[in-house]
Amino acid sequence: MKIFNKTALLIALIIMSLGLNLNAQTKSPEPKSGFPLTKKIIHNHLIYPQNALDQKKSGKITVYYDVDAEGNATNYRVENAFDEECAKEAIRLVKMIEWNPALNTGKPVACNDYYTVEFSAKSYKKAEEKNPRQMLPEQKHPAQKSNKVYDLKDLHNAPQPYFEDKNVTMAAYLRTNLRFPDQAKQFEIQGTVKLSFIVETDGRVSNIIVENSVGGGCDNEAIRLLQDLLWTPGVKNDSLVRTRTTQDITFQIGSRNYHDGNSY
């Protein structure tokens, strides 16, 4: 009887293991930046339609689309929406997202999917009053209507960090604004975080991916610094275009560690 019970238990464990493995290999499409960071990026890019904001219209809008086996999304649509202009804004935002394809038993497959964007007029107004959204000055080129993403080598003008004070450089911005994470201080973690991302035609970044991780909170701090920064968009054929680029952000401990009073 004991042998039978052990055998039955072993079989059950094997079946559970196979089931867990199958679930791990069967997934819906996921943003390349991951869902938590993508939600923050969407929030950072959202421009509330003025009429909806004035009328305090709020709610959720679900955007449906098709994702092929290579992660390319097409056929964006909204079936029901509390406001037409908010629906257009939701589609604009979701179109920015780059996807990893769905998996079926570990193999990429095409599927239908959806992403929900939340609009809260009260929260938006409060945030704008507390910290008004920085905008680029008017650009001399129009934005390309295509959603295509270009590499730096294909551009006539590459994206550049934008600062109202022309004397500020990227290095100065990082020195002034970088907050060395407590965990990295405690364990004396240092190194260079490499981020890849897309500079959108409005100067904000999207699809942030950590290409080289340092840990200790440094990755999150590097992402924060990047999200707080505006860029002049890339230019191709006299049009502003979406551009894929990278940025290194270095976390370096000085000659003395923080126990000796180093302020980082």
Image: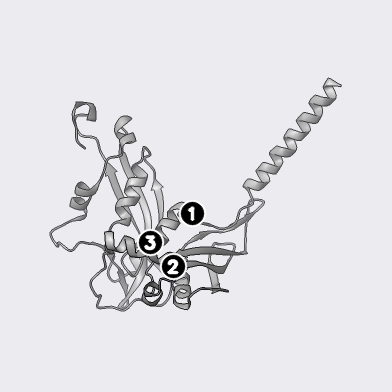
Query: Which residue is found at the position 38% from the left and 72% from the top?
Result: 53
Q: Are marks 1 and 3 in contact (CB under 8 Å)?
A: no
Q: Amino acid at mark 1?
A: Phe
The dot on residue 35 is: 1
The spot of residue 16 in percent (x, y) is 71, 38
Horizontally, residue 113 falls left or right of residue 225, namely: right
- Pointer 2: what residue? 93
Query: Which residue is found at the position 18% from the left and 64% from the top?
Result: 164
The spot of residue 148 in percent (x, y) is 43, 71
Which residue is situated farthest in the left direction here? Answer: 167
Crowd rating for badge 3 (residues with CA inside 10 Å; few <14, some 14–19, many 20+): few
Q: Nearer the viewer, mark 2 or mark 3?
A: 3
Q: Amino acid at mark 3?
A: Ser
The spot of residue 243 in percent (x, y) is 36, 65
Q: In terms of secondary structure, where does tag 3 sit?
A: helix
Q: Is residue 151 above or below residue 222?
A: below
Q: Is residue 95 above or below residue 185?
A: below
- Pointer 3: what residue? 123
Crowd rating for badge 1 (residues with CA inside 10 Å; few <14, some 14–19, many 20+): few
Quadrant containing the N terminus in the rendered view: top right
How far is the residue under mark 1 from the one under mark 3?
21 Å
User: Which residue occupies the foreground of this view, 126 or 151?
Assistant: 126
Q: In terms of secondary structure, where does tag 1 sit?
A: helix
Query: Which residue is found at the position 35% from the left and 71% from the top?
Result: 241
Task: Tell me which corner region of the image, top left, top right, bottom left or bottom right, holds residue 145.
Answer: bottom left
Residue 199 visible in the snapshot: no
Query: Which residue is found at the position 54% from the left and 71% from the top?
Result: 74
Task: Tell me which corner region of the image, top left, top right, bottom left or bottom right, holds residue 227.
Answer: bottom left
